[in-house]
Image (cartoon, helix red, strand yellow):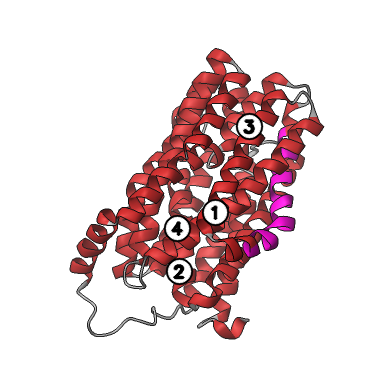
Amino acid sequence: MLSDIRAPYAVLFLVAGACAVSIARAMTLSFLAIKLQQDFDLGPAMIGFLLGAGSLLGALVAPVVGALSDGLGRKKILALVLLTLATGMIALALAETVIVFCAAQVTTATAISLYGPMSRALMSDICTETVRLKYISWRYTASNVGWAVGPVIGLAAGVASTTLFLAASAIYLMLALVLQLIHFPAPSSADEQLPAAGLAFLSNIRTAVRDRRLQSFIAGSTFLIAVYGQWTVTLAPYLTNSLSDGVEIYAYAVSTNGFVVLVGNPLARRIVERFGAYKAVAVGCLFFVISQIGLMISVGLSGVLLSMIVFTVGEILVIPSEYVLIDNASTERNRGSYFGAQSFSMIGSFIGPAIGGPVLETFGGVAMFSVFAGLQSSA
């Protein structure tokens, strides 16, 4: 119930904002691999490295940014992230050389890596513990509405066209403006005993780094994210080169991913609540492995879409469970630090393309999907 939330309008903004950000991201960034391949004639190995670099940088700076948000306020950090995204989209629209294009891409990918943990931490701040999973599930569902709609818009308007990048920039600017008009209450535990911002910054980073539960979670999550964090980067060139109508099949696969999340996410949330986050993660890993085997042997649209459905079932079990594990490990005073530190696992978003791209280019799709299945087994 919205009565369980300290600022209902703020939560509704975060939910709607997740949808808007995903639409902007899906209709532009999800086609970057194809643009780099077709417009700049880059191979899968270089594409994987370039598109993974932003996630790597985001993973490295997220703990610091998260800790800063505990002291400076998450609203300020989130506004800065949105403005960075808007600027990066304009640069992608106007870039005429691969160097400028890749620099802009790294900037936007880094900002995207920061947007997720900061917005989730902000949602935890304003929701009571009993309803946090419910509303983070709403946010995740809204995000995937964007992933269901965005690729179709991108395909209809022209893959990675200048107009789409400028439209995405306008979306980010609008969200940054609306954010300034919304009041976000301070965490309910905030009081006069809170340490000074500088001391809190150092203390929160130290606490997060030393938490053994968080260390174990980050290690396992890194392997998971290596497969699902940037799956579009490796799947796009594979389908484009391996199957007829590969670009269209890829767009349908991305939309299928978003649609299955919309249908299955409410059930997945109940499974996580009933059986616990750890069991849900284990089952999700099994579905990831099966999906990689399915993609390995698929020879047409039906096989790819069926494999993507299996993949998405794993995703909707794993992602809410990750939120629950981090939220339970943190407190209101250090939540930004914990969600930021959890972003260390986003290094997997670099590992996946950086390994998958060269393996795809050198050994082919069977080898790449085998490697990904092995990573999921390790998690």
Which disc number belongs to residue 292?
A: 3
Q: Earlier in the sequence, mark 1 or mark 4?
A: 4
Residue underneath mark 2: 122
Residue in the image at 60% along x and 65% along y: 274
Residue underneath mark 1: 279
Which disc number belongs to residue 117?
A: 4
Taking the image as drawn, is residue 69 in sight?
yes
Residue stretch in magenta: 250-270
Depth order, front residue of 190/68: 190
Q: CA distance from mark 1 to mark 4?
A: 23 Å
Looking at the rendered structure, the secondary structure element under dot 3 is: helix
Neighbours of disc 4 within 10 Å: few (<14), some (14-19), many (20+): many
Mark 1 or 4, closer to the camera: 1
Q: Quadrant of residue 249?
A: top right
Q: CA distance from mark 2 to mark 1?
A: 26 Å
Q: Residue 243 location, x and y as percent?
A: 74, 22
Q: Residue 244 location, x and y as percent?
A: 78, 22
Mark 2 or 3, closer to the camera: 3
On screen, residue 119 versus residue 69, left or right, reads right
Query: Looking at the picture, which amino acid does disc 2 mark?
Result: Leu
Mark 3 or 4, closer to the camera: 3
Query: Looking at the picture, which amino acid does disc 3 mark?
Result: Gln
> Is mark 2 in CB contact (under 8 Å) with mark 3?
no
Looking at the rendered structure, the secondary structure element under dot 1 is: helix
Query: Looking at the picture, which amino acid does disc 1 mark?
Result: Lys
Which disc number belongs to residue 11?
A: none
